[in-house]
Image: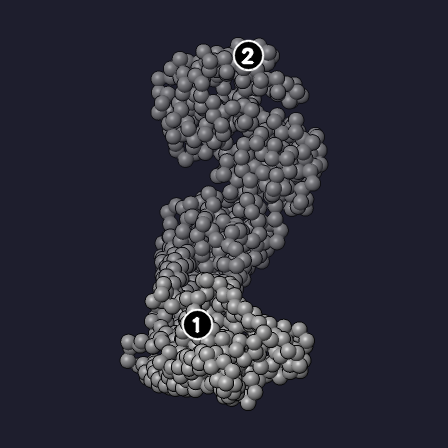
Amino acid sequence: MKKEQYFREELQRLFMGLAIVPAVSITLICCFIFMGLLLKSRWEENTGQRDYITEVLEQTMAACSRELERLETFPGLFDGEPDPAGRSEIFEELYRATNGLGYEADFYILDANRQVILSDQAAVPSALKVAPGVSWGIFAAMEETPGQTVLRLLDGYKQEGAMLALGRAVSQGDQLLGYLIFTLDHTAMQPLLERSAAQAVVTDPYGWAYLCGNSSFLTDSHQLSKDIRGGDTWLSYHRHLYLLSARPACGGQLFVYVLSDVHNIVISLALNAALVITALFIMTIWVFVTTRKVTEKKTADFYRILEVMDQGRQGNLDCRVQVDSNNEFKTIADAYNGMIGSLRQQMENNSRMAELVALSQNRQLESQFNPHFLYNTLENIRYMCRIEPETASRMIFCLSGLLRYSLDSSRTEVTLREDLDHLNNYLTILTYRFGTRLTCTVDVEESTLDCRIPKLVLQPMIENSVKYGFGNGDRLTVELKAYIHEGHLVMICRDDGAGMTPAALSELGRLLEQKEPPGRHSGLYNIHRRIQLLYGHLYGVEIRSTEGHGTTLIVNLPVRREESLC
Amino acid sequence: MTTGRGRGTSRFLQVFLTAAVLGAAAAGVSGCGSGKQELAVRETVLPERELVVYCPHPQDFIDPIVSEFEAQTGISVLVCSGGTGELLDQVAQGQEPLCDIFWGGSLSITSPRRDLFAPYTSANEGLVREEFQNREGNMTRFTDVPSVIMVNTNLTEDIPVKGYEDLLNPKLKGRIAMCDPSASSSAWEHLINMLYAMGDGDPEQGWDYVERFCENLDGTLLERSSQVYEGVASGQYAVGLTFEEGGARYVKTGGPVRLVYMEEGVLSTPDVVCVAKNAPHPEEAGTFVDFVTGWDAQSIIAGTLNRRSVRTDVDEPEGLPDKSSFPSIESSLELVTGRREEWLERFAEIYEKELSE
């Protein structure tokens, strides 16, 4: 079984290794790259927008600054109320300057008391209404660095009205003449933010917003949230994920923050990845199950062959391999079936041959009649003919019965009862031969009489005792018993004769196991051989003997009753 | 209120997303060819110098001054807003971010808690009017804040309102906006003002009026002083008891409101700007005190933010009456600060009683 699973698992592993794992990894890598590409494009859009805004702001401020410097040199700007001609000339110049900026800028020319001399706006923004002398707002910055253009975010804290102011304090010698100021309202620059989907915020260094694409980034004071000002590239703000890039503009006077909402990208891709993983998971299970089925189906023939081979190894050659599919396995199965078939044929032939041999051997063995016995008996009869013709006649009758019995080749097995009847003929002859020197008792259990035994088993047992039992003694008692013990028919022939030396006993044991009939003890050999041929090696003759204390022959047989008598 | 780095985004997510972008860039599939591009671009930095200001002033008042302070000094200010009492408690508890400056809150409320503040004498102390001198050493006066009654002109056409007495008019029942004096300094000032003005200088005599006034409140007491002026300006209430600047903004912007300086007498209490004890940024805190008490800031406050300066060299605010034009009364700071708990309790009792009736 273990082998079987190993092969199947190997096949499955092959499927998984070649199909699932690469599919999973490739899909995940693709997801990963796809997300990376999306994010990268967002990032490029983000930084592009950031750089664009920065560039425009810087260009605009630089242009303003140039215009301011040029205007400063314009004569008669602060010389009180200019006449209408001069006024229109200045206006023309101012409009030309602001038009060149590309964004709508307002201009204010203020005198040293911060009163408006000239402006394109009727109303002055509150951030420019600072009392003379008060160092506040753009004025504080202009006075701090006279002769230079300064940039300040004004009213950055107001929801509406944040403006960038560029200004110069104009002096002649130590005498302050006035101020030149350009303002860029946040509404003027707002279109800058609409170029891209990325949301931008332009602030001063303290976070007060000038332009803002998304008011949720600002506090109530219109200040950019500190979380964003100090945020990382990947910014989590209000439970949304943003890509944040930032850079200073205009020499650190302004800061441009651009935020791209990547929340949906990340969420949707995470969802996609989850979906893909789920699909792959289900697919994996499906493939796992189907590959199991397929491998089971594909390897079924293989295992059927294996199983039949295994049974064949254990001796069961009756199984045939049944392969339905028409592939290599069928060839193997057919070849195996053919091989097993011819093997079985061969084995059947062999066993039939062996049976024939055993049968003929048995015939030969049972037909052997001891010529010594015949000779001795005939000698005895010759004497008896002279002394007791009556007895001689009876002996001849017994002998002829014995001969007929032994020559009857129609049966190999008889009942114990029949064999006992014929043994009586033999015993009668022996009684005549040995007279009182030989005492023979037969004690057979009634239940054993119906048992089938090989023909002529009892006689050689007695014969053996008589032949070797007398030794140098002149009396011999032989006892024959038969009983059933533990399902075996046991027949015992015990004598009180000379017995055997241990060497003779072991020699006799060796003789009995020979394949060829020995010269001596052929009677015992015959019985033993015949029993083994008929009933197998579990059965046979056993000899026990002690020198001087007689010999015991034990014949062990299966209990087989004569059916017709039952 | 966090400072410094952004919150939330987990380290793992940051690394993962960055890896995704760099991975995609490295995969070379992008045709943009933008070449070498640093992802971690953060060229901006938060200003190094910081200041934490706890401030009960209205946002509109705070923002212009704070933004100008930042621009002129380069110090970034973090403002924590709230009611005076609430903020003082937070300072006492040492709540994060630790307070550097306590800016606002009338003297009568902050004075009993002056052990929270470190001694500081502003550079402008010599130019501060006599009555607003920093006598305690750690209580620099910021502005002078008279109490006023703010009246919605649309809702009070037929109701004359000249002082406290007129607030007992049954027509105003339930239409008077007043804050809980324990929560708001402007309401506390009004309570003192009532007691002194209606008790003819003896606060104990003023409680009769308080009882009748509470009856007319009809169970309405607000949580924050901003609810008073916003409520009156929006027409939710007919009259409100507030401080001068709270109402003056609406007058200036042309809202349907006017300010009534009580004919029975107006109490004017300065508010303060103090350096907190153990301030994390003491140097910046000093700069701030000097800035807000400086001539420029005080001029702007008087000129555009409708408050009265404590300085001798700054004029009365534009559009607001001179202090001499309404009857001023004085209170004893010692008595008022000493009796605060008792008076608050007494007021609460009266209010509760009226509420249960």
Q: Quadrant of residue B138?
A: top right
Nearer to the camera, A194 or A499: A499
B296, above or below A362, in the image: above
Q: Quadrant of residue A57?
A: bottom left
Provide the secondary structure element on which disc 2 rests.
helix
| Whole-number angstrom distance, CA of label 1 to CA of label 2 | 154 Å
What residue is shown at x 52% (from left), y 78% (from top)? Answer: A432
Provide the secondary structure element on which disc 1 rests.
helix
B313 left or right of A128 in image: right
What residue is shown at x 64% (from left), y 34% (from top)? Answer: B92
Where is the N terminus of chain B found, in terms of image quarters?
Answer: top right
Q: State which chain disc 1 sits on.
A: A
Tell me, yes or no, if residue B186 can be seen here.
yes
Q: Amino acid at mark 1?
A: Asp
Residue A404, percent across and down? 39, 81
List the residue tagged with mark 2. B207
The numbered dot on residue A421 is: 1
Q: Amino acid at mark 2?
A: Trp
Nearer the observer, disc 1 or disc 2?
1
Disc 2 residue crowd, few under 14, some 14–19, many 20+, Cα 10 Å: many
